[in-house]
Image (tube, rainbow, N blue to C red):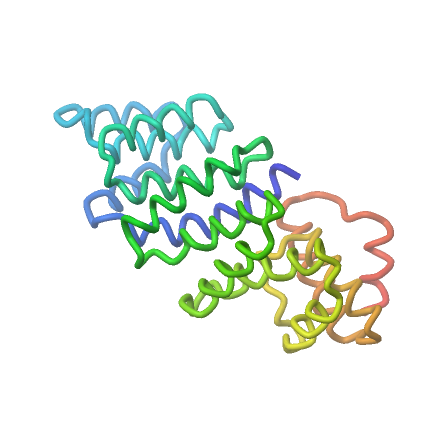
Amino acid sequence: MKKILFLLILVFASTVSAQSLSEEYAAIMNDLMYMKYKQKFKHLDNVFKDNPNDPWYYWMKADIYALGEKDKETRACYEKAISLDSTFAAGYGSYARYLVNNVDGDFEKAVELSTRAIELDRTEFYYYIDRAEAYLKLKKYDEALSDAFFYIDQDGVFVFVGQMVLINCYIEQNDQEKLKELLMSFAVNEIDFMAGPDLATRIGDYYLSYGDQERACGAFRVAAENYDMLGGKAPDDFQEKLNKCE
């Protein structure tokens, strides 16, 4: 499950994080993509040898440690980055995202970090969705829904990320009326790949309960694509549902 979360989050995070990077820093990140784990650190040390107190240096190290699932080191680097620059919005925002998506994350702190990031930069709308995710983990549904709706109204690319928060809020609140209204507003095959196998399957099950086999199959196919990408075997009960879509 941790691998699934990581891969899905990586797709989203790698895209939105680029909004905060200058061309210079984006070029460094691009170079890192093609290096092995230990080489990445050596490269960063060399690039920032004349400016070791650049908060982006520690931001990038945190990103690498996160790839290696080094929790203690990841958090330490984010803490260092924001201690070096109290106006480093990307540092606060990325730290919050890491905590939100960590199984043992500190969600109260994630809310604080996201809020600080928003105060510093209100143009990066993904700070709102990260805070919405943290509120959801804390079961503060009104706050989560408020941030999710704001995000959906502002972001024209990753709208489904906000809709996933709505779906999960409605499921946890057992608000079946709003859940059905939202799910039935999607066109066939509109369930996004970023839903992941678990949520996509659950959405498909809801469509079946609504008597909508076509939409259900669209959701199940998204789940199947996720299983294929991850190289894992889909559960037998899921495979039976998918077979009925052939």
Task: Indicate the position of residue 62 as horizontal and vertical percent values.
Answer: 38, 31
Percent position (x, y) of residue 74? 42, 27
**Residue beneath the point at 19% across and 45% down:** 24
Above or below, 218 against 123 in this view is below
Which residue of the protein is positioned furthest toward the left in this rendering? 50
Q: Residue at x 64, y 53 (%)?
A: 196
Image quadrant of residue 33? top left
42 vs 161, nearest the viewer? 161
Residue 172 located left or right of residue 119: right
In this picture, residue 95 sits left or right of residue 106: left
Residue 55: name its quadrant.
Answer: top left
Q: Nearer the viewer, residue 228 or 219?
A: 219
Residue 155 x, y percent position in the rendering? 42, 66
Look at 73% across and 73% down and name the residue there. 215
In the image, residue 96 above or below residue 62:
below
Q: Residue at x 51, y 61 (%)?
A: 146
